[in-house]
Image (spheres, rainbow, N blue to C red):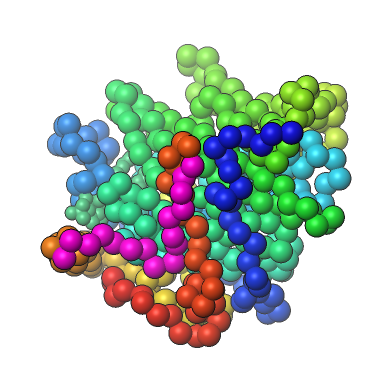
Amino acid sequence: VSPNIGHAASLFPQKPKNLDPLPVSKVLKRRKVIPPAKVMPPSLVATLRKNVGKDLSTISMPVSANEPISLLQRVAEQLEYAQILDAAVAQKIPAQRLLHVAAFAISQLSSNRCKERAIRKPFNPMLGETFELVRTEKEVPGGFRLLVEKVSHRPVRTACQAESANWSFGQSSAPTQKFWGKSAELITEGRIRIVLRLPDGTEELYSWSVATVFLRNVVMGEKYVEPVGTMTVANDSTGAKATIEFKAKGMFGGRSEDVQVESYGPDGASTGFSLVGTWTTSLQLLENGKPVREIWHVGDLVDNAPQTYGLTTFAASLNEITEIEKGKLPATDSRLRPDQRAAERGDLDEAEEWKRRLEERQRAKRKEVEERGEVHKPRWFVKVDGGDEGEEVWKLKTGKEGYWEERSRGAFTGVEDIF
Ligand code: PIF
């Protein structure tokens, strides 16, 4: 069996030597709330009109355009349903493992289900900004740890690696937008790669490209986002595949939520197993068209979601400094970013002033680096050869200078002062 060309094993995250700081024996109580938004975001059309022909990512937007979450935390939100990966590892039937991975891929889009999420954007992280997340075994079987770093400013690119005893997750992603009159296309460049570590000691590699989502009604009417087209989850170890189709509604049908997933073995023949459901609520596993069981169900939104940016309770917990992070974070962690903090409290003027200052410092630093003829070197990730397709892939550094290694020694080195 030939694995997919271009999805070489070397592009997948490596198995870590240990999972420090896991296991965490404490029972954590995370917050599930966030202060309500104080102002409405500026109109996107007005912003577009004012900046005709410009690349929006190069203009500074007011803080009121942001939700109090950074793009790094948005990347971390993709792991809200990491337990599906743990469930995947426990499946004996290969097609069922594949469909669990497909369900995980779909669950990643569900944070977009609340329409309020479509009217703001995340904070654009500073270059070198990081975000760590440690989920304990009380929260997810076995727990997991995750690190994201902004590795490039123009174009914006983040590198992420997460791992548990059962699996690893890697993605180097770059978001871009295209405007098409009434809608905008939000494209996420950067394949997701998963390694499952099976009970028999073997590893299975899976990868897919994140579906494109459309923001509808940019000009007028209720804004919402919906994934479109298809997404193919590949088992790169065997050549098996799951095809995920986001069903379009008719001309006046409103948001489409239905998903249909088919699975094919290494020989390309249908396995008889499939998934049906929606990307907003739940997914059922079917065998020969008959329901077997539910394998994903969506979690909660913050109470009063329309007033609180449409956030999930998972997202609302991400800015909190819990016992796990207290005294452990590097100075670059998003939780310590002053403008985002002020915005979360509702102190918009203070947030605006901080944002302006941070951006100016960042410009000054960039100029210095350029004048020295250097380029920014990310602290925790290294670029690997992207293979035939020339993909830009970053992997977490390992060894003494690795993030988790330095974190457990209690001393981060080479961390820049960016806030
Ligand atoms: C600033 O970011 P903003 C600008 O990049 C500015 O150019 C830069 O100055 P410099 C500042 O340092 C930045 O802080 C603009 C841009 C940022 C993102 C990426 O926060 C995430 O002021 C976008 O914002 C994800 O925003 C969108 O890019 C997913 O934050 C929904 O690109 C945009 C706006 C995109 C709006 C899309 C709306 C939905 C279609 O001088 O250093 O360059």
The image quadrant that residue 123 belongs to is bottom left
Residue 405 vs residue 364, the one in the foreground: 405
The image quadrant that residue 124 belongs to is bottom left
Q: Quadrant of the N terminus?
A: top right
Question: Looking at the image, can residue 327 be seen?
Answer: no
Question: Looking at the image, can residue 286 be seen?
Answer: yes
Query: Residue at (37%, 71%) from the top-left corner?
Result: 332
Query: Where 160 falls versus 289 (above or below)?
Result: below
Across and down, in percent, residue 346 comes to 33, 63
Across and down, in percent, residue 190 comes to 47, 43
| Numbered marks: total | 0
Residue 383 is one of the magenta-drawn residues: yes
Q: Quadrant of the C terminus?
A: bottom left
Q: Is residue 161 left or right of residue 197?
A: left
Across and down, in percent, residue 323 comes to 56, 80
Residue sitting farthest toward the top: 251
Query: Residue at (77%, 42%) from the top-left corner?
Result: 97
Q: Is residue 294 left or right of residue 412?
A: right
Residue 67 vs residue 168, the one in the foreground: 168
Across and down, in percent, residue 200 comes to 84, 55
Residue 105 is one of the magenta-drawn residues: no
Q: Main secondary structure of the magenta part?
A: loop
The image quadrant that residue 176 belongs to is top left
Q: Which residues are magenta?
A: 372-387
Query: Residue at (74%, 23%) from the top-left corner?
Result: 268
Query: Residue at (53%, 69%) from the top-left corner?
Result: 398
Query: Where 406 falls versus 267 (above or below)?
Result: below
